[in-house]
Image (cartoon, rainbow, N blue to C red):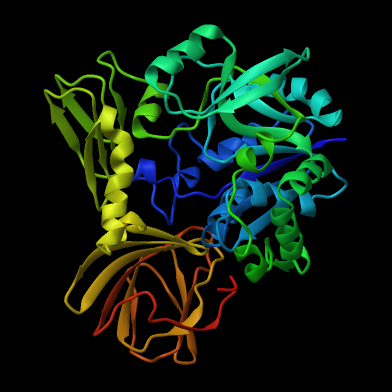
Amino acid sequence: MGICPVIMAGGSGTRLWPLSRAAHPKQFLKLHGEDTMLQATVKRLSGLNTQGSITICNEEHRFLVAEQLRELDKQGSIILEPVGRNTAPAIALAALTANDDPLLLVLAADHVIQDEAAFHAAVMRATPLAEAGKLVTFGIVPAQPHTGYGYIRRGKDLGEGFEVDAFVEKPSSDVAQDYFSSGDYYWNSGMFLFRASNYLEELKKFRPDILEQCKASVMEIKADFDFLRINREMFESCAAESVDYAVMEKTSRAVVVPMDAGWSDIGSWSSLWDISEKDGEGNSIHGDVVLHNTHNSYVRTDDKLVTAIGVDELVIIATKDTLMVAHKNCAQDVKIITEMLKANSRSEWELSREVYRPWGKYDSIDSGEGYQVKRITVKPGAKLSVQMHHHRAEHWVVVGGSAMVTSGGKTFLLSVNESTYIPIGVVHALENPGNINLELIEVQSGSYLGEDDIVRFEDRYGR
């Protein structure tokens, strides 16, 4: 029997702000290599005997997941969590909806694994243990005495793995050094392999309340386009608990299989610097960057020239709407900044200037009193909803591709350098009938320009 991958694609990735935002977190970004982290997770499964897949994500990220899987020509179930309830309930949803009681290979969508052959080998070593009814967790062979990870202490040798003697919390520096020196401890990776029914048996034993709420959540599961929707009310009432606390730390069936595969969870900018290519001065550079007398720094820019002179050990991140400078040793404190922004009702904690939609994206170029300017990109064949606005008018100018416009009951085609005006209250729609991206400049004017001033009459994406 094959393995069913379960990819956990929730989470907000706040420690990698400002590149990672709540509406577009790190698992959907190209942080290491040419693929997004989600896509890299899917692609590294190639070569394993897998059948189907289950991806679990937040409802607000559903179109990001579907589009990134579509780009890989990969199909599988996408379960939408109406609210986050941590990993124990999420895995239960996968186990309850998987066909034919497969082995579930539970992976996070935001991990880097640089040695795919070693990853495959560890999964193959774990498979007989999982088939025998064990609940396997993968322990990362530590490269250093790291204080940012939880650890697993190994027990009795089982050949391809070890019984789990204990899960231990993130240690102090001295304790981490003792763990590292002993050779008996592994980093807790948060990756697992077990049969669906075995996981549910242990969850019933230790957290029957979680199991019952998850069962109730999937009793009336509904297919919605590419997605599976569970019962919101039932799932909201489920306790939030990690799989470690709910099951793995309590079960007698837990085993650990070592993995030495160049793993990182990229939990901070400094950890991304650790695994990135560097120049002769120890700098990792991404984008239009010029440095002088600068060492051991991570510098990344989206669109503007960034220069640094005479600095060391810094993280410098420039996006279209923000600039962050941090000492590398304090980079994990960026979460404090995002909390401050959220408390002060600043949108930057959640949204970047570029906002992705199922039909494409828009970039808020400029705004002022009574006006806003956006560059809108519509993918080939995509269509925005049929809609109207109570408080704003819109002027569209096509700068690339072609646009099929419906306005006030009329439908017409616009090409490059052609434009149209949509008055307040007029029902309208925009579609890309071509084979290349439609690019247009939208100038909004009115008394209120918020995104919630949209009355949708028809939407192919079910919003």
Query: Residue 134 or 46: which is nearer the viewer?
Result: 134
Q: How many marks?
A: 0
Query: On the image, which quarter does residue 145 sit in?
Result: top left
Image-based side of 422 in relation to 80, left or right: left
Q: Which image quadrant: the C terminus?
A: bottom right
Q: Residue at x 27, y 56 (%)?
A: 341
Image-based side of 238 in relation to 172, left or right: right
Task: Give the percent coordinates (x, y) of residue 203.
Answer: 74, 46
Residue 218 vertical placement versus 34 (above, below): below
Query: Residue 337 or 173: which is nearer the viewer?
Result: 173
Query: Residue 381 or 88: which is nearer the viewer?
Result: 88
Image-based side of 389 in relation to 381, left or right: left
Query: Residue 80 or 138: which is nearer the viewer?
Result: 138
Could one spot residue 45 in this view of the protein?
no
Image-based side of 339 in relation to 48, left or right: left
Task: Give the percent coordinates (x, y) of residue 273.
Answer: 36, 26
Q: Residue at x 73, y 33 (%)?
A: 193
Could one spot residue 346 in this view of the protein?
yes
Q: Residue at x 54, y 50 (%)?
A: 10
Residue 266 vertical placement versus 439 (above, below): above
Task: Give the percent coordinates (x, y) of residue 395.
Answer: 31, 78
Residue 423 vertical placement versus 86 (above, below): below
Task: Give the percent coordinates (x, y) of residue 200.
Answer: 78, 46
Q: Which image quadrant: the N terminus?
A: top right
